[in-house]
Amino acid sequence: MGKQELFRRIIALPLLVAASGCVSLPDLAPFADATAEVHRGVQSGHDAARAELELLASLHPDDPDYTGFVERLSAAWKTRLAATDALVAYADSLAAIAEAGNKGAEDARSLAGSVDKLLSAVGSTAVVPGTAVEIGAAAYGAIAKIRATKALKDALGIANPVVQDIGKILGKDLEKLADLMKREELQADVENAVKRSYETRLSASLSYRDALIARRKADQMSIAASVAAPAASTEATDLPIRRQRLLETEELLEATEAWYAPMVKDLDDVERRFTAQRSLVEKTRKAVSQWMETHHGLTTTVAEGSAQVNTRLLLDTAFEIRGILEKGGPR
Amino acid sequence: MTPNWKDLETFDDWADALRSLMDVARAALKAGDAGARARIKKDLIAFVDRSPDWIVKELDSLAGEVIKALGKAAIDDAISDIESRTVDLARLTKAIEAGTAANLQEARRIRLERARKTVDSITQTVGSLSDLKASLESGAKDDAIRTDIETLIESLQSLRNTVENG
């Protein structure tokens, strides 16, 4: 290498390093983390719907259609999970490019370390001089940033239309899942099936309880009438008998709680479960929509050479999903 | 239209009410109207809840079948709708996977992974060759191999010179 060329290179290095100061790479690790939460939300939404369909299938053992629904939903959802899995890997790969750009100097030092080992292996006592390593590392740090920025810009630009289409499909799928989980749809079916299953097993007991409730109501009304207008009431004469019977009825009703309370609890559980499931599916739907917006924003931002990516809304929703799932999910 | 439950007393009252509900349910199923299906299902469930067992137990069974049919139609619609987008989604997923593979390759390139691996591999090879050279016995055949190894090591040493001299 001639002196002029060497001089040119030495001058060029600081310029390159200075130029790299203008190149900013966004921190994409939070975006990648949020994508993983979207995936978990999509998975859990399916799991919740599947569990309710399985419950319906078990309550209608003579009807194979319900088992068919379970299988069809899971088969279709497998493709959704593959899609969000691919989005997680894709987001990780974007983060890997950004990280590679930010760690250029470190990687150059690592390469110099490898070269040192090679020199030692071939019997050289020389090592790559520390100053040369640092200059090379700084120069490569700048090159890596420029390369990574270009790679991100290209990758985002190519992927964005595909990502938007995937997001639209997932949005529609989750909307359909939300429709299915509505109070008047699957929840009504499950509640009805649970009630009928208790009625089949406890038919006589439920009739007995209904009769007790009817008698209590009749006695309460009669007592209320005689208390309001004692002179006019024809009920006044047997008031003590009715009072005594009302006490007995209350005791008998209390005794029915042993078998009636589990049914009430089961129905309350259905309501509680579906409320949580609807919340999860809704938040996941919102997260998918925010994910698409964030990706679009990222594409524009990187194309404009900025590192300012707004992931706040997406992260907030991702944390909400994580919160629901960490509490044990909707079941 | 939701029956006026308080007016229903005899078996015929309840049977007429169910007949009307079933007509509406049939129309909702035929029209594929999700909202109408959900509304009539609610009325039919109320019918079963409110009807006195000692009068209309057999009617409850009929109502139960229609409730099931309405529920199944809604589930089938939802799943069919999701299924209809599966092929498109699978195609798009493949496109993203291809992009991901290219991104990872680019990240590895920027991180100089290939260069580091190459240098590390050469270092390892040099070590192995030096060991082999030391272990060779004197002899015409071994001498020829030793010469080859020496040539190889020399070429690697020229790599050292390149690195050392920039």
Image: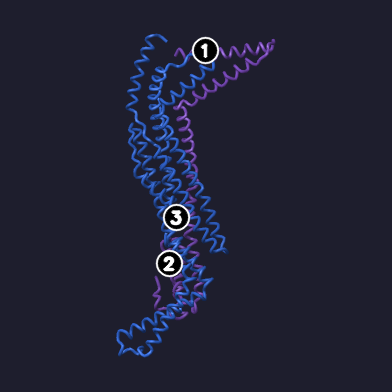
Chain colours: A blue, B purple
> Quarter-wise, where is residue B121 in the image?
top right
Where B157 sits versus B31, above or below?
A: above
Count of marks overlaid on the render: 3
Q: Whole-Å distance between the Cαs marked 1 and 3?
A: 66 Å
Chain ID of residue with mark 2: B
Q: Check disc 1 and report its element: helix, strand or loop.
A: helix
Chain ID of residue with mark 3: A
Q: Residues within 10 Å of mark 2 (few under 14, many from 20)?
A: some
Residue for badge 3: A330
Where A145 sits versus A268, above or below?
A: above
Q: Viewer-nearest of labels 2 and 3?
A: 3
Chain ID of residue with mark 1: B
Please tell me the numbered disc located at residue B158: 1
- Mark 1 / mark 2, whichever is N-terminal: 2
Q: Is residue B15 visible?
A: no
Residue type (three-letter) at the residue carrying disc 2: Lys
Where B94 sits versus B38, above or below?
A: above
Q: Check disc 3 and report its element: helix, strand or loop.
A: loop
Residue for badge 2: B42
Left of B143 or right of it: where is B159? Answer: left
